Image (cartoon, rainbow, N blue to C red):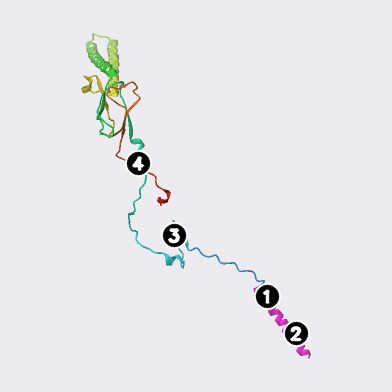
Amino acid sequence: MRVARASALALGLLGLVFLVLFLRTYFFAPPHAATPEQPMFARQNGSLVLRDGSPLQKRLVVAPVSLSHDTAGVALPAQVVALPDHQVNVLAPATGRIMSVAVQLGQHVSRGQVLATIAASDLDQAWADDRRARAALDFSKRAYDRARGVLAAGGNAVKDLESARNDLAQAEAEALRTHQRLQVLGARSDYAAQGQVPLVSPVDGVVSATNMAVGQNITDSTAIQMTLLDLSSVWVAAAVPESRMF
């Protein structure tokens, strides 16, 4: 009888131990840390690299690049404009009356081509000053050569030679000034006899605007008379919808 009780007690204890182990294993065990899922691809040196076994490998297709043209035309509002630094404003070299205008709007012109002629009163004065300056320069050169010869012969003082050299330097400076004045006015000998100065194109281009008319008086030498555009390179400004930009 005592043996049966001892066996029952042992079996009860053994069952209790199994129950404790079961509860500890399935209910009180600490959760295992979840293994993070590996990314399907990674970036290396600016490239995308697929990891081994990535699902993307089945969807990846390698093919040579081919050039294709989009045959679908797109109509967009746009305009052709000249480059900002290819626009030249032409000013009159001198004030006076416009005698002729040789070009029209939209006409192609070449560098050095005469655009118009102007009867300028300043031109006559500039030519007269240039003639006087050249005459004074010639006289000063001869006087200087004569002073050197007299000094070499012992019949002249050094101060006379220095005075002649000073007069020659002043004459050369005045001749240079009057010559540069004619260049600024754009004076040309073939127009000088008529007292006119030509308005010459500084570049190759197209006449886009003009304020000149025959008989008109130019009183402001800083006023723009013509505008020339160099159309060798142009911009096309178009309004592209955002949906068509990609």
Q: Where is residue 103 in the image (x, y as percent from the top left)?
A: 26, 30
Q: Is mark 3 on a helix, strand or loop?
A: strand
Where on the picture, by quarter, is residue 12?
A: bottom right
- State which tag comes first along the sequence, 1 or 2: 2
Q: In this view, does 173 lie above or below 61?
A: above
- State which tag comes first along the sequence, 2 or 3: 2
Q: Is residue 41 left or right of residue 226?
A: right
Q: Name the disc covering residue 79, or none.
A: 4
Majority secondary structure of the magenta segment? helix
Q: Position of residue 177 (x, y in %)?
A: 30, 19
Magenta run includes residue 15: yes
Q: Which residue is drawn at 43% across and 67% down?
A: 58
The residue wearing badge 3 is 48
Q: Is mark 2 on a helix, strand or loop?
A: helix
Looking at the rendered structure, the kind of residue marked 1 is Leu
Report the Cα–Cα distance between label 1 and label 2: 21 Å
- State which tag comes first along the sequence, 3 or 1: 1
Q: Where is residue 110 in the image (x, y as percent from the top left)?
A: 25, 33
- Identity of the residue furthest to the bottom in this view: 1
Q: How crowded is mark 1: few (under 14 residues within 10 Å), some or many (20 or more)?
A: few
Q: What element carries label 4?
A: strand
Magenta-drawn segment: 1-26
- State which tag comes first along the sequence, 4 or 2: 2
Report the Cα–Cα distance between label 3 and label 1: 48 Å
Q: Is residue 126 above or below residue 25?
A: above
The residue wearing badge 2 is 9
- Identity of the residue furthest to the right in this view: 2
- State which tag comes first along the sequence, 4 or 3: 3
Looking at the rendered structure, the kind of residue marked 2 is Leu
The residue wearing badge 1 is 23
